[in-house]
Amino acid sequence: MILPVRNAIQRLRACSPAPGRLRGMKCMLLASLLFCTHAFSMAEELAAEYQVKAAFLYNFSRFTSWPDEAATGAAGFHICLAGSDPFGDALESLTGKMVRNHPLVIHRAGTATLSEDCQMVFVSNSETGRIDELLAGLRHKPVLTVSDADDFARQGGIIQLRLVDRKIRFEINVDAAERAGLKISSKLLSLATVVHDEKAGMAP
């Protein structure tokens, strides 16, 4: 049975240097156990965090209005991932859910060019170095851009997810939404921190 982290720390401190090979091996084993317990706990927390973030993506699709001609792609409503996928299996639970009577489709683009069918793009933290490039490519297109990368909304992304006191909060850049021709529900805006473009020259 895996010991709680606090108990493991207390027992690890009790392992003062002392003669005896057996005691030394026990301390080494306990140190390894503590490391594995911490890693396991962090992995669980991260998985739970992205389960919640996946649910947020679905709700963003429900409380945002697209121009009629861009409301759905050729085979449904597409959420596209740019960069590495931090969601694990969390996004699979969204597959097949309906958005405006069309099935939701997950498209993993990786670092490749994003599909023209994307109605929403989640930009992974792995793409931090090319956020400006990605946003420039989507500028004025009816695409809802979402990320949990730092300062994403203030750089011109539409929605930024943030972890605050172990709860998911979000910012909405209303300038970026207007540029994209998207209408964000007042209900969603009331739950968000509303921000504006910070970089000069972003406005139309």
Image: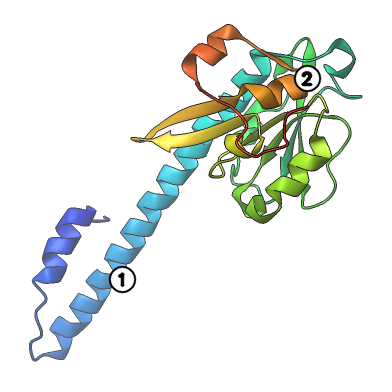
Label 2 sits on a secondary structure element that is strand
Q: Residue at x 76, y 48 (%)?
A: 133
Instruction: Pinpoint residue 94: horizontal percent, then vertical percent.
Output: 66, 27
Q: Residue at x 51, y 28 (%)?
A: 170
Q: Are marks 2 and 1 in contact (CB under 8 Å)?
A: no
Q: CA distance from mark 2 to mark 1?
A: 46 Å
Label 1 sits on a secondary structure element that is helix
Count of numbered circles in the view:
2
The amino acid pointed to by label 2 is Pro
Residue 108 is at least partly visible in this image: no
Instruction: Pinpoint residue 151: horizontal percent, then vertical percent.
Output: 55, 41
Quadrant for the C terminus in the image: top right
Residue pushed farthest front? 200
Say which residue label 2 marks.
Answer: 103
Left or right relative to 16: residue 56 = right
Taking depth in this image into account, of 199 and 131 the one nearest to the observer is 199
Taking depth in this image into account, of 67 and 61 the one nearest to the observer is 67
Crowding at dot 1, Cα within 10 Å, few <14 / some 14-19 / many 20+, comes out as: few
Say which residue label 1 marks.
Answer: 32
Q: Residue at x 16, y 69 (%)?
A: 12
Quadrant for the N terminus in the image: bottom left
* The image quarter in which residue 79 lies: top right
Crowding at dot 2, Cα within 10 Å, few <14 / some 14-19 / many 20+, comes out as: some
The amino acid pointed to by label 1 is Ser
Instruction: Pinpoint residue 148: horizontal percent, then vertical percent.
Output: 56, 40
Left or right relative to 32: residue 54 = right
Residue 158 is at least partly visible in this image: yes
Reading the chain from its start, which is encountered first: label 2 or label 1?
A: 1
